[in-house]
Image: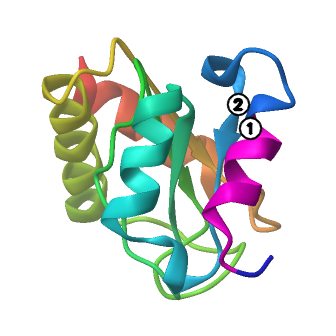
Amino acid sequence: MPYEPSRLRQAILAFGDPRQVAVEFRRENWFNDEIQALLSELGAVFCDAESPHFQLTGWVTSSTGYMRLHGRHRWYSYNYSDEELKELASKACQMETSGAKRVYIFFNNDYEGYAPANALSLIEMLK
């Protein structure tokens, strides 16, 4: 989608309750103060996605924090190390400090089955 903040606003508002809309960007030009402010104003959830192309931003634009983990160096088949999981746990805590009442963390589908083990390890670190 081309960079059109007004179109993004219209799309989010079309759902009725912007607080129930999550937005994930896949183009670098969307990661700026204007878009962060727009999402915050509407209360829409920013999906903070990590991938070989993007690092987590730490943005919290609503009462919900949302991290989607595609893998740091490889798409869809990535086994996060304990050190990387500790970083993710720290980011989740920072989201809470930034106003998130809930933080959802999803390990993206991976065909080698690393996601369940990574999720269980992260849960232990967050206890």
Amino acid at dot 1:
Ile
Residue 88 place in picture, x, y as percent: 29, 50
**Vertical position of residue 72 compared to residue 100: above or below:** below
Measured as percent of width and height from the top left, residue 96 is found at: 22, 24
Taking the magenta stretch, the answer to whether it contains residue 18 is no
Give SS at disc 1: helix
Q: Position of residue 19 (x, y in %)?
A: 61, 19
Query: In the picture provided, is 6 more to the left or to the right than 53?
Result: right
| Left or right: residue 56 compared with residue 50 | left
Q: Secondary structure at mark 2?
A: loop
Q: N-terminal of the two: label 1 or label 2?
A: 1
Q: Which residue is mark 2?
A: 21
Q: Quadrant of the C terminus?
A: top left
The reply to whether discs 1 and 2 touch (Cβ–Cβ < 8 Å) is yes
Q: Which residue is mark 1?
A: 12
Q: Which residues are magenta?
A: 3-12
**Front-most of residues 20 and 107:** 20
Query: Does residue 87 appear to the left or right of 101 in the view shown?
Result: left
Q: Main secondary structure of the magenta part?
A: helix
The answer to which image quadrant residue 123 occupies is top left
Residue at image location 60% in from the left, 42% down from the top: 106
For the N terminus, the quadrant is bottom right
